Amino acid sequence: MKQKKLTIAGKELSSRFFIGTGRYPNPFVQNEAIKASGAEVLTFAIRRVNLGAPNEDAILQHLEGMSFTYLPNTSGAKTAEEAIRIARLAKASGLSDWIKIEISVDEKTLLPDPIETLKATEVLAKEGFVVLPYTSDDPVLCKRLEEAGAAAVMPGGAPIGTGLGILNPYNLQLITEQANVPIIVDAGLGSAMDVAQAMELGADGVLMNTPVAKAKDPVKMASAMKYAIEAGRLSYEAGRIQKKKYATASSGLTEFVSK
Amino acid sequence: MQEKVLILGGGVIGLATAFELSRRNYDVTVLEKTSCGGQASGAAAGMLAPYSEIGEDPDDFFKLCLDSLRMYKTWQADVKAISKLDFEYTESGSLHAVYHDADVLALETRQSWQSEWGAETELISGERLWDMEPTLSKDIKAAMYYPEESHVFAPDYVKALEAACRRNGVKIHEHLEAVEVVDFKQSITVRAKEGKEFTGERLIVCSGAWSNELEDVFGIRIPVYPIRGQICAYDVPVDQVKHIVYTSQGYLVPKGNGTLVNGASEDIAGFKTDVTDKGIQRLTNWNKQVFPFLADMNPFHTWAGLRPATQDGFPLIGKLEGASQVVFATGHYRNGILLSPITAVAVADLLDEKEAYAPLASCKPERFM
């Protein structure tokens, strides 16, 4: 079956699953879950990484010998200025020129600050970063981020780590319909159902961490999410039937009745 | 008649459980393949640091760790009193140090929920930080101070537990090499080398990193994996470092005898317990970013232990549903020293048929499909 691959900033990706490296119970489970996910893009907080020696970092060291596109993130930044500063640190360390902008102010909801996110996107895109901003699921804002030079836009389904799923499917569908860059749903998903829904709404990919890392069996859940992404995408490409109020016989008897 | 309890494994969990059961008048026998405290227990840095270890949310694992920390003062005094041995227990407090302004939001998040659990916390930056810990790197932006966090000298603690057990009449059999559970249904029978058999009415599984070997015996999944933890230690002037210092890359613990313990490099190496250049260099390359004076020093000692990690991060503590005479107490990963009192008391309460300690709901041994 021919399936279109996801391409971001000219890079063709083998998987539509972006996975985070936080919160796994231990390095063994982390590695097995990441392998099971089939993900090629890996995200982690720059502030937690040993930038002087990334290959000796407490988490990244376990991934030696595996090949990934790193998507370092600016989590913890409260302003555009701070996000820009740590993005530059990550690039200078040679880790990656991809950057996930994540700017939050409220320690309870960690919701993204739209104004600061837009500012940081403009600056970093001009500097040649491949910018993937994590943003609220506002269609107008997502369009503005695209215009500001984002290589892909990453609206949240719900606040980070909540597992509440896609709180506003209407908005998400508008976002995917209008976009000229890939839309990656980032944050708030809980289970395979949420993931399939995101993909059926036209998302090009999904970024997850907590629902995999904190599952009772992270390896099995990584695998479940991988299938959900594939199933949702196939369903989206195949085109679903219209919803109707009354039944239509699936055996199609009437056509064959001779009069 | 005293009930006869067999305990598989003489690590810190097995010994602490034996100690608690001996105080409640059970007839306890500990069966150890090698020697007591020879694995993760003796290798541990001895940190009692639930707030530093768990920064994300207050799940049952956090509650276990917190309750155990709060038991420690009395518990360690009891072990000392009965064993007549001393070991270091220092209420040093800890500093969770960060290097970026962006870390402060994460510290505020943990402060916000940890405070609801009664944690004493203080976000420290600027001169006060270096007043508290004078040799700390000037690159550190801020630190969360947890005055309640403490540490014990793990090898001495385990020795004292063993001595306390013996004084209370616990029989400890070491160097058994192979230990096989022959029967756990009708009565408990465990066979060691040369056919030597031990019998009892109860069996407590405290096999740590080796627990997975018992899957076939009990017919359940036991997803416990050994994770090697490599540690090194420096000889520094006593009191030069005052607090446990914790960072995203590892920790440093100042012992009363002037030993500064630096851990840990974790890796996946099966049951190997040797240290590697890579593992130790990871620590020695990084630790000068915490204490610059370490740049001119070499560790005088390096070692490794196997930590029993589990699939979901929670230990296995509880009775088997299908065979309530068998109780699991294993899979404590990096927190066996901290969790030893709460595990011992929770297991003893299960044997006494008391109401189960609530956080055990997340620790059921048969929860894995």
Image (spheres, rainbow, N blue to C red):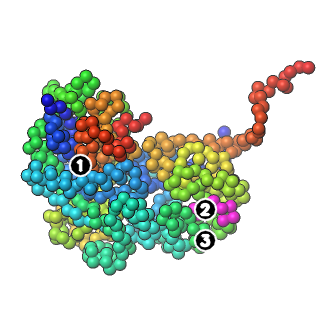
Q: Is residue A133 magenta?
A: yes
The residue shown at (53%, 75%) is A81
Report the chain holding disc 1: B
Q: Amino acid at mark 2?
A: Ser
Report the chain holding disc 3: A
Asked whether B110 or A20 is in front, the reply is B110
As drawn, the label of residue A136 is 2
As drawn, the label of residue B341 is 1
Q: Earlier in the sequence, mark 2 or mark 3?
A: 3
Say which quadrant the C terminus of chain B sits in: top left
Asked whether B285 or B225 is in front, the reply is B225
Q: Are marks 1 and 2 on the same chain?
A: no
For mark 3, give the secondary structure: helix
Q: Residues within 10 Å of mark 2 (few under 14, many from 20)?
A: many
| Distance between mark 1 and mark 2 Cα atoms | 46 Å
| Distance between mark 3 and mark 1 Cα atoms | 50 Å
* Residues at marks 1 and 2 touching, judged by CB atoms closer than 8 Å: no
**For residue A161, above or below residue B191:** below
Q: Foreground mark, 1 or 2?
A: 1
Question: Residue under circle 3?
Answer: A115
The residue shown at (61%, 45%) is A196
Q: Foreground mark, 3 or 1?
A: 1
Q: Residues within 10 Å of mark 3 (few under 14, many from 20)?
A: few
**Which stretch did the figure color magenta?**
A132-141
Question: Residue B35's image quarter?
Answer: top left
Q: Amino acid at mark 3?
A: Ile
Q: Amino acid at mark 1?
A: Pro
Residue A142 at what x, y percent from top left?
Answer: 66, 63
**For residue B350, above or below residue B64:** above
